[in-house]
Image (spheres, rainbow, N blue to C red):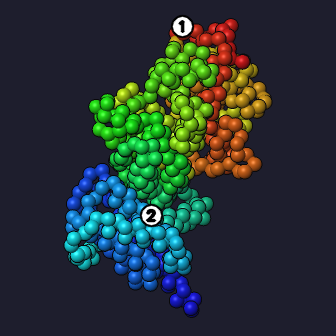
Amino acid sequence: MPSETAAEWQKVLAVFADEAEGLVSAMEEHLLALEVSPSEALLPDVLRGAHTLKGAAASLGFQAVTDYTHGVEDLLQALLHGDLVLDEKRVSLLLGAVDHLRELCRASLSGVDSLGLVHQAHLSRLREGIVAGAPTKALASPTGLPRAPESRSTARSRARMDLERLDRIVTLTAELSVARGRMAQFLARAEESGARWEDALTQQREMDSLFESLQEEVMRARMVPVGPLFRQHLRTVRELARSQQKLAQLELEGEDATLDTAVLDALRDPLLHLLRNALDHGIESPDERRAAGKDPRGRLRLRAYHDAGSVVVELSDDGRGIQRERVRERARQKGLVAAPERLRDDELLRLIFEPGFTTATEVTELSGRGVGMDVVRRDIEALRGTVAIQSQEGQGTTLTLRLPLTLAVIQGFAMGVGDQVYVVPIESVQECMEVPGGERTAEASGVLSLRGQPLPYLRLRQVFSLGGDSPARENVVVLKHPDGVIGLAVDELQGDGQRVIRPLGRLFQGVPGISGSTILGDGRVALLLDTPALVRRAILQASAAAPAPTAPQEVPSSAPRAP
């Protein structure tokens, strides 16, 4: 085959691969919706998807896909005409057929036009599913099927949006190039024309505006909707619930909310852990739900929305909720806290994120080992996000993940310690204050009074063993976090600004307290602090010390401090 012809063939296969995946995924979603809420309008959509896939496969000579899809059409026609009843068994059969179609398409794309005995077994099951209904009417040929599925128009719309964004990027790049040329000419003639600094600043502001617009467009190009990730779990919830002899459905909201592709990829595992945990610990069996006056089918809701420069992902269920007494009992058994009954409700609930913590009495395929929720918190905090939890016994639980829109750029607050500069996300900074004279020590940690409340703090000079003398004035940056509020004692406050985040090199990965780096305007490297790790370290050290006084005055120098 000539190279040009081979290249064209590869393009055709790529188009088929995208179209086939979209059609099969749409069929799967319609079938899951049919099982929960039967609708006459959905079966024709599934049939149209199968017919379109069969036509596309036949045009490329993929005979195994064509023949099997024809069998799927026969079963769908029998259901559509009322010869067979759509029940859970036949939905499962059709979902299995969808899985096999996906495998057949991938095999055909790789040059294999059948899957041997596996394929024959699927064909037999499909035929048995049709014959078992004893159809009395001949299957009529589909009518009105050439209508294009919604996935095609959605893909075309997204392609148009991508092209429009690329056009804007090209336009901004050209304008920036022109502005750069004007600046170069201005600087070249500056000495002769006696140009003023004000003129140079005007030129610079024009370039800054263009650069910020270009950066915003480039960042938008990395943004993708959460819908495809959410929809992947429709099938996951059904199968996991069935494995536990439960009934459950997943409802989706806010599928158009967008976030960075890197954030989306990192969200996959935590979301799966949360769904598995909700199905095992939250959703009750059908008999339990009936006894409690609930619908036998449990409901999980996955919702996404933008809020204050972040993406919020909520997973809620209408299950049994978190039983506080079991949490307290497990906390005592594991020695996590001496008196769990004295904890606030939010502090008690957050114990489920501790390593090895579980309220399950036995290990199952879904949970019981105490690693799932710990992994969720670790992964979300690695994204510079936070996890919050609310629960009402007998009513259900809601877990809220707050994530940054992107991992590439942050609005960061810089602070200096000696010759080193550290950066924290500006949204975690609550306020800044000066260290009282009586607290000026060389210790790595301590406790201050912040409006009458104890404020554990860490002195970064000692934490990172920087050495050198402390300055005449020492400042504390107060950071807020779901685990609590802490302070970081530093030499100098340098203010906020936009920071481009770079990952640490392999040699420095895993350094405690550091999660990344950034280049400052003067060319120096600043380190991005791992705020959650520092928060837990400060709280742990403060808990081992004597309690700080609660009087509104500052802590006296003789007060006990954390070691």
Q: How many marks?
A: 2
Q: Circle 1 sits on which residue?
A: 551
- Element assignment for label 2: helix
Which is nearer the eye, 167 or 78?
78
Whole-angstrom CA distance, mark 1 to mark 2, is 66 Å
Q: Which residue is mark 2?
A: 99
Q: Are marks 1 and 2 in contact (CB under 8 Å)?
A: no
Task: Name the residue nearer the viewer: 416 or 459.
Answer: 459
Inspect this view and state whether residue 439 appears: no
Residue 231, how many percent across, how many down?
40, 54
Q: Residue at x 57, y 89 (%)?
A: 3
Q: Residue at x 48, y 75 (%)?
A: 14
Question: Image point 63% across, 31% down: which residue?
Answer: 534
Q: Residue at x 43, y 35 (%)?
A: 282
Horizontal side of residue 516 vs 233, given as left or right: right
Instruction: Pinpoint residue 164: horizontal percent, then vertical percent.
Output: 39, 67
| Mark 2: few/some/many CA within 10 Å (<14, 14-19, 20+) | some
Residue 34, how many percent across, how many down?
A: 29, 56
Three-letter amino acid code at the position of disc 2: Asp
Residue 76: image quadrant is bottom left
Question: Does the image show residue 541?
Answer: yes
Quadrant in which the N terminus is drawn: bottom right
* Label 1 environment density (alpha carbons within 10 Å; few <14, some 14–19, many ≥20): few
